[in-house]
Amino acid sequence: MDELLVRVGSWLEECDGVTISGGEPFEQAPALEMLLRGIRKLTKANILVYSGKRFSALTEESSVTAGLIDCMISEPFELDSPQTRYLMGSDNQRMTFITPLGRKVFGPLNRQAEDSDRRLDVMFDEDGVVWLAGIPGRGDMARLQVLLEEKGTYLRTTEAKA
């Protein structure tokens, strides 16, 4: 854990928030709590955690009750549910503000998504691997795959097949 915190420590100086998402973070609850405590020592940035578990099942987790998480997006992702809410993969998911900072930062984001919200960050590592971060709209990755393949470039994705 210490090595991980050292590696992300310099990035924390530049960011205003930290997002932790799946797999399922609470499947490793003790490690998640250690990570969150370490991040809290290094920065005052907000912390958003995604979980596919129901919030009611997480209310006694120490990382939740200790205020280590500012905001949580919870509930199982449902492929057949609409995707119209900002920051959420399916409309059945729920945004919960756990700290005052969470309410301040994420309160205005608990809304319907707008077209301008649908964007992805693109990153390249030293090996030439491309990483995308963000929440694409349904089918966006499949459309990107088709466009790239038409140009002779191939894309592997973990997006669920519709």
Image: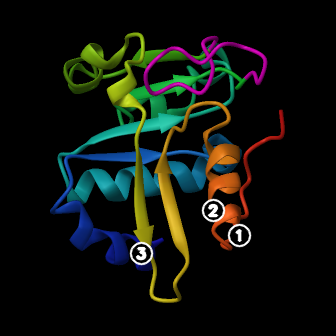
Q: Check disc 1: other Cα within 10 Å, few if <14, some if 14-19, many if 20+.
A: few
Q: Which residue is mark 1?
A: 154
Q: Amino acid at mark 3?
A: Asp
Please tell me whether mark 2 sits on a helix, a strand or a loop: helix
Give, as a single range, the part of the protein colored magenta. Answer: 78-92
Of badges 3 and 2, the one in the foreground is 2
| Above-or-below relation of 29 to 35 | above
Residue placed furthest toward the front: 150
Dot 1 lies on which element? loop
The structure residue drawn at horizontal position 40% and vertical position 40%, both measured from the top left corner, is 119
Q: Residues within 10 Å of mark 3 (few under 14, many from 20)?
A: few
- In the rendered view of the protein, which quadrant contains the C terminus? top right
Would residue 131 be counted in the magenta stretch? no
| Residue under label 3 | 2
The residue at which mark 2 appears reads as 148
Q: Residue furthest bottom?
A: 127
